[in-house]
Image (cartoon, helix red, strand yellow):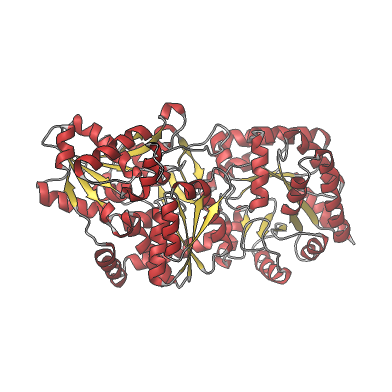
Amino acid sequence: MPTNIDLKALSQLPDSNGHFGPYGGRFVSETLMAALKQLEETYEKLWRDPAFQEEFDRDLAHYVGRPSPLYFAKHLTEKVGGAKIFLKREDLNHTGAHKVNNTIGQALLAKYTGKPRVIAETGAGQHGVASATVAARLGLECQVYMGAEDVQRQALNVYRMKLLGAEVISVESGTRTLKDAMNEAMRDWVTNVDNTFYIIGTAAGPHPYPKLVRDFQCVIGREARQQCLDQTGRLPDALVACVGGGSNAIGLFHPFIEDADVKMYGVEAGGYGVETGQHAAPLSAGSPGVLHGNRTYLMSDEGGQILGTHSVSAGLDYPGVGPEHAYLKDTGRATYVDATDEEAMDAFRALTRVEGIMPAIESSHAVAYAMKLAKEMDKDQTIVVNLSGRGDKDIHTVAQIDGINI
Amino acid sequence: MSRISSSFTKLKTEGRKALIPYVTAGDPAPGVTVGLLHAMVEAGADVIELGVPFSDPMADGPVIQLACERALMHNTRLTDVLEMVAEFRQKDDVTPIVLMGYLNPIEILGYERFAQEAQKAGVDGVLTVDLPPEESQEFNQIMREHDIDTIYLLAPTTEESRVKYVCENGSGYLYYVSVKGVTGSASLDVQSVANKLEVVRKYTDLPLGVGFGIKDAESATSVSKVAEGVIVGSVLVNKIAELVKDQDNIAPEVAAIINDMRTAMDS
């Protein structure tokens, strides 16, 4: 890591215009500018309001089930042989992933701003389920945009959303995955901006979304930091999290930014291998550009068209990434690597068999890299892996890979 | 004087309003575009908004998204669009051309290189849908250095406090988005448009164009009573979509729609 960066300043980004260095910002059509500004003002006011904080914390404790445990994966550690691997168990949250931390927060914002309707985009369906869940609880109308390909891959979550009273809209345009769902959600928002709150599922999009999603997800890192101190007497040596849009990763990383000795590794979806071009790893193999309201690393061709992505995991199948990760990469504070489909599936099986914990395929990417990393580290060192979601939703995908029809 | 301002000045002297058609470059095939532009001018277009295809046109409805997809099937890039403009300029050195699209293709080409090549090709203005003035200071400066106008959007949701700021950053003309929504969506309400334009005029002398929701000669005429420019897109692109298998008829049939609007607006 470069020694000349001011870590305190880095942790205080974005600036007042939503910029993380050259990244972030607000690149949207004029119709949405007023809504974003209003959201920013509302958020800044409420985030400092003790009553709002109290309600958020209460929901996280009694509805989500926080704090989530930090579990020492003894058997995985023994199997790998190397640094101690700890799992931050976001998979144990209500609805099965870290996504709910953010939807609880944004639904409270929707409630305080008096919008009767929420929309969301979803890839794997976890954010859609988490949005439908909080909407059901608050009595809000909810529509979820989901790429047609993902609707097929994640049939279970589609049905969960329907049971929760949400309408799932299958998006047939473009590549029929998460980016197209996000386009469609933006179109809906531009049309219904007066009565609709857009619950963005990751720490990306126009300012203030990358900031507020991060702030809602930072509970992961704050808890993990304290739990690590309690259990090991010191901070971890490395953090590992998967990165699609990057909300679980930034939630884990951000509270450690000023701890210079804690290394951070974001693991992107390597798909069939970054060298094949069939992947979803913009930080590893993309370049800066503008999409979905922010400047960040993207996968686009030399003409500036957004490229199709591939990943076995629907939740990582996205050509962009949150702008804060883009800047953490450029400053060298965090390192971004990838795990292929095959490596992720191997990690899925390994964790399932030795710990009896079935991770989401997204989170399996983080487990895969952590297993590699642990081998190169000393036995007295520790790694915290964000186990961002559970694998129940992926059983069909895994079975399909095994050639089994359930 | 730029082609854009001389066009609006001339129209003003004649007591007429600008008819501004939009088509996506390369839709449905690259060979169609330049001939189509000439036909639109002949039918009465005063300024042309030429869409630069983008894979993820978030502010557009399904009609223009599909147009982008058709154009991208032939891999029509920003640099190809500039070549089309250069070819158009060989026969028409008067009609202003505004490139309308999204930032990423320009960002990937580089602002400076884009500005140089666009100026050389004969582009007069650029309207980048996802680039509000807050993010465009460097962009504006480079475009100005190359005599390219930066056209900005105003929307029904733009508060008065912001109208001034947007107006100060715009040049050429301002584009008022008449409805909350994407291109090709609901019909507009002329009275509410007129009310909003009155607010805008407090802050600018630039010509005001109105787009989104203009579907026929009747709506074009009513908008022309309250604005300097009438921008029409989805209805033309729809016609092109109908004629994908009959491409020879695209130019005449699109021209016929424009001609109807022109006649109605001028009468």
> In this orientation, does residue A340 appear?
no
> In this orientation, does residue B64 appear?
yes
Q: Is residue A258 above or below residue A92?
A: above
Q: Position of residue B147 (x, y in %)?
A: 67, 41
Q: Is residue A79 left or right of residue A120?
A: left
The residue positioned 68% from the left and 63% from the top of the image is B186
Q: Position of residue B150 (x, y in %)?
A: 64, 48
> Which image quadrant for residue A359?
top left
The residue positioned 62% from the left and 37% from the top of the image is B115
Q: Position of residue B28 (x, y in %)?
A: 72, 39
Q: Position of residue B172 (x, y in %)?
A: 70, 50
Q: Nearer the viewer, residue B201 or A324?
A: A324
The residue positioned 58% from the left and 42% from the top of the image is B55
Q: Is residue B248 left or right of residue A181?
A: right
Q: Is residue A128 above or below residue A195?
A: above
Q: Is residue A383 left or right of residue B260?
A: left
Report the quarter where the N terminus of chain A lies: top left
> Which image quadrant for residue A381?
top left
Residue that protrudes farthest toward the front in the picture: A405
